[in-house]
Every structure is written in structure tokens, then in C-alpha cells.
Amino acid sequence: MSRKIFLAGGTGVLGRRVVPLLLDAGNAVTVNVRNDHAAAAANTAGAHPTTVDLFDRAAVADAVAGHDAVINIATAIPTGAAAARKKGWALNDRLRTEASANLAAAVAALPAGARYVGESITFPYIDEADRWIDESVERTYSSATESVADAEAAAIEAGGVALRFAMFWADDSAHNHQLLSLARLGIFALPGALDAYSSWIHIDDAAAAVVAALEAPTGIYNVAESDPVRRADHLSAVAASLGKRRLRGLPSFFVTLGGPPVEALARSQRVSSAALSAATSWQPRHNIVDAWR
């Protein structure tokens, strides 16, 4: 089914993969952009660029009018030292709360059948050791993640879908580059015990999940690789990819010093995305331990 889709976050690491998939499926895509470079990239891809302040509810409603669906994957995830400061997450929190609410409200004003797909994350799930984590598992939030509850609520109120993504793997991701840069210095900078599970999702699989979610029933769905492995397996794969005999993991006190946001990243999470696969035709194609190699 072809649609006219308004896409927020279409120029980010995930959005750059989503746009061509939507266009290839026969959809018309309007991409919200913030500068001339992004507008040119959207035009080159075959999408229609527009600029709207996502924090202005009236402007968002005007921009979304006439569309059949809204996809909201707009984020501002801090990297490096900024990620350790609460104010470093301020813009990302506003996107999850205010922008999500505005976009969901705009969908509610569209004719019946309009769709909403929003972004969330798996990190708030509790540590479940070796047990599989589905969407019913308890979640606990920190200052860096509590805003995803608002983003999910907005999606459900719009009769839409919230996708809980595992950690992204992308060769053009700043977070991946940072992890590999430290690995070249001999440090494996993923917090947590090496025998704990770490769930990831390849960015191409994540993009395919966004498109598939347009056909999914209203609800919340995990998006993760099909066979998550332990951190020790990732450490070995990263070391092998760099030709190193071994890497040092982060000391346990690093988690304590980092507080709740780092503690959440250190949990053992073996995330299942079976629900999304059952509801749609989507299947993850990549195992991240192989992607490192």
C-alpha cells in the first residue's frame, strides 16, 4: 500500500536508510530538514524536503496535513563527554516528549486509517540474565531514558506503533566509531560483565523494521538481532577485526561511577523481536558479531 508519509528524522543514521526503502515501496515521502545540505540530500534521494519546528504544535499540524502516515525517528543522542551530563540529553528528551506529542496529535487530526510509527529503545529493560526479553518484561528508567515512556505513550495514543530498538550497529555511526577508536587503544568500552548478553540491531534491519511497522497492529515491539550473544563474543570479534590479540574490558567501578544511565547499558539483555516478526513480514538479516568481523 503506497502512502504519503511525513518523516521526522529522515537525515540521521537511521533515516538515511529509511527514505530509499519508503520510496522503493512506492510511497511519497516528505522529509523534515534543518539545513540546505539536508534538503539537497532529500531531493537527490527523491523525497520532498520541508522545514518545520517540531516543538511548534500548530506548525507541525499544518506540515502533516494531507499525509497518510507519520514516522518519527528524530533523535539527538549525545556522544563522548556530553553523554555523561544530564543537560547533554536535553534536546533528545524534548524530541521524545514534546515533538512526539505534537506529531502524534497531528496524526490524530488526519482521516481514519492514518498511521504513526515512533522510536523507542530496549535499554530500560531490567537485567534478565540468560532469559529472553519480550515486550512484557519490567522496565526501569533513568534520567537518560525516562522520556521514552512519553514517546511510547504518544505512539499508542495515536493508535500507532512504538519500536524499541536495541543498540544500533552502523558503519557511519558516531557511537560505533567511538567504540572502535577506543578498541584501537586496547579498550573494549561496552560496560557490563563479559558473560552478560548484549542486544544490537544492524541499521539496515532497523530501517526495514520501520517500514514494516506501517502495517503492524497498534502496539509496542522490540527490534533486535535474532540471536544476541554475550559481550565476550563482541569483544573477541572487535579484537579480531582490528588484528589485536586481546582487549581490556572496562573495570566494574566504571558502572558505579556512571550512575543509572551506564548501569542500564551494563545489564544482561537477551532481547527478542519475535512479536514484530509475527505481526509483519520483517526478519532481521544480520548478526552483529559477524558484522564486526
Image (tube, rainbow, N blue to C red):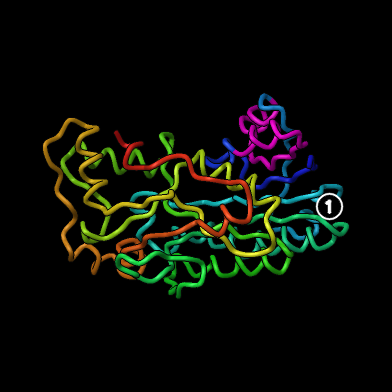
User: Residue 142 placed where, x, y %?
Assistant: 42, 71
Q: Quadrant of residue 59?
A: bottom right
Is 110 on the left or on the right of 23, as rendered? right
Secondary structure at badge 1 equals helix
With respect to residue 105, does 22 lie above or below?
A: above
Is 8 on the left or on the right of 277, as rendered? right
Residue at numbered disc 1: 62
The amino acid type, in three-letter code, at marker 1 is Asp
| Range of residues picked out in magenta | 18-43
Answer whether residue 39 is magenta in the image.
Answer: yes
User: Residue 45 placed where, x, y %?
Assistant: 66, 27
Is 164 on the left or on the right of 27, as rendered? left
Q: Quadrant of residue 202?
A: top left
Furthest-left residue in this view: 245
The quarter of the picture where the C terminus appears is top left
Answer whether residue 204 is magenta in the image.
Answer: no
Task: Tell me what residue is drawn at x 71 percent, y 27 percent.
Answer: 46
